[in-house]
Image (cartoon, rainbow, N blue to C red):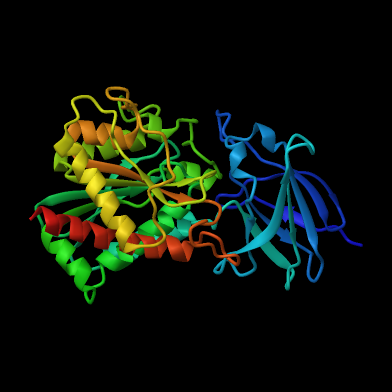
Amino acid sequence: MTDINIDAAFDSGNIEVLSVDGATAKLALRKDNASEFRQWYHFRVSGAEGREVELKITGLNDSAYVKGWPNYNSCVSEDRAYWARAASEFDDSADGGTLTIRYTPVGDIAWFAYFAPYSMERHHDLVAEAAASEGVTYERIGETLDGQPLDYLRLGEGSKQVWLYGRQHPGESMAEWWMEGALEALTDPADSMARALRQRCTFHIVPNCNPDGSRRGHLRTNACGANLNREWNEPTAERSPEVLAIRNKMDETGVDFAMDVHGDEAIAAVFLAGYEGIPDLTDEHLEGFTRYRSILERRTPDFQSAKGYAVSKPGEANLSMSTTQVAHRFKATSMTLEMPFKDNDDLPDPDQGWSPERSKMLARDCLAALLEWLEERG
C-alpha cells in the first residue's frame, strides 16, 4: 500500500508530519511564531482516493485551548468550496492528547482544517469587489510587520459611526466569513435593510486585522507573536502596527457602535461579550449593549445569551482588549461577537457544524438587529 502525502506549504498551512504509514499519519501542530499558542491546523492529504485515512494530531494537551477538542469534528473539503465535518475523536491519554480524524475521500485530494480557511487571496477578492461598489471608499490605513496592507473600507452617509472589524486572531477564520456576509449585504443596492442602515450610519470596516498571522497559519498572533487583542491600551508600531493603525483611525472618526468578530474554541454557541467592568460605567451606557443583545437573541435562533464568558467586576475590565478599550475610550456601545469552532448546540448541523454559510447569514442578522437598535433609540 502506498503512503499518503501530506502538505501544508501554502497560505494558512500548519502541520508537522511525524510519520506516515499507508493511510495513517501521526501529526503535530506548529506553534505561532515567537509564541506558545498552537491550535490552528490546515493541510492537504493526497493519494488517498477511496481509502479511509486516519490522521492523528498529537500533543494536544499542550495546545492553547484543550477544551476545544472534546466533541469537535474536523473540517474537511475536497473542492475547497464546501466544507463538511469528518468524524473525529479526542483522547487525552494518547500521545499527550490526540485528535483522531477519519475520512474516506472520493477523489485523490482532501483538505483538512480547524475551521474552513479564509485565504488571503479571497480576502483581496473581497476587498476589491467591495471597493468597486457604489458608495464605498477604500483606504490602506497601515502596513503589517510582513509588509502586507491593512485594508479599510468606508460606506454610508449617516451620522452614527459604526465599526466592524474581525480576525484579530487569525485562526478564527469564521470572522472573515462573517465579514464577507456583512459586506455583501451592505453593498447590495437591492437590500432595503442595508439601504436604511447606510442612510443612518457611516460604516468603518476592517475585514482582516491580522493578515500576517492569517498567511502564516497562526491561531492567535501576528508576525512577531503579539496577541493583537491584548494590545489596545498601548499599541506600538514595532509590536502591533495593526492595532495602532485601527485605533488611530477610530480616533479620527469617533465610534458610536463597534463589533469585534471572533470565534471561540470551547463554547459550542454564538454569544456576545461586553464591557461591564470598565471604569466609570453608567447604567445608560451599558444599556446599549444589553438591549442590542436582547434584540439579536430575539431575531435569530443561532444566538443565545445563557452561555458565554464570565463578566468582569466593576472597575476590573482589561482595557488592553478592543471591546473594553473602545467602550471606555469613546463611550461607545462595543462588543465582541463569538462564534463556535464546533457546532452550535442550540441548532446543530451534523454535516457542517458551524460553517462559513452560517457565519455569513449571522452577519445579516447582526445588521438587522443594529437597524432595530437604532430605530428604538430614535
Residue 348 placement (x, y as % from top left): 53, 62
Residue 343 placement (x, y as % from top left): 54, 56
- Vertical placement of residue 363 versus 140, above or below: below
Front residue of this view, candidates 251 and 96:
96
- Vertical placement of residue 310 versus 280, above or below: below
Which residue lies at the image location 72% right of the left edge and 59% below the top edge? 45
Is residue 139 visible to us here? no
Q: Left or right? Give the position of 210 relative to 367.
A: right
Residue 339 placement (x, y as % from top left): 45, 51
Split into 4 quadrants, where in the image is the N terminus?
Answer: bottom right
Residue occupying the far bottom of the picture: 190
Front residue of this view, candidates 61 and 158:
61
Split into 4 quadrants, where in the image is the C terminus?
Answer: bottom left
Which residue lies at the image location 64% right of the left edge and 38% below the top edge? 30
- Vertical placement of residue 156 versus 64, above or below: below
To which quarter of the image does residue 94 belong? Answer: top right
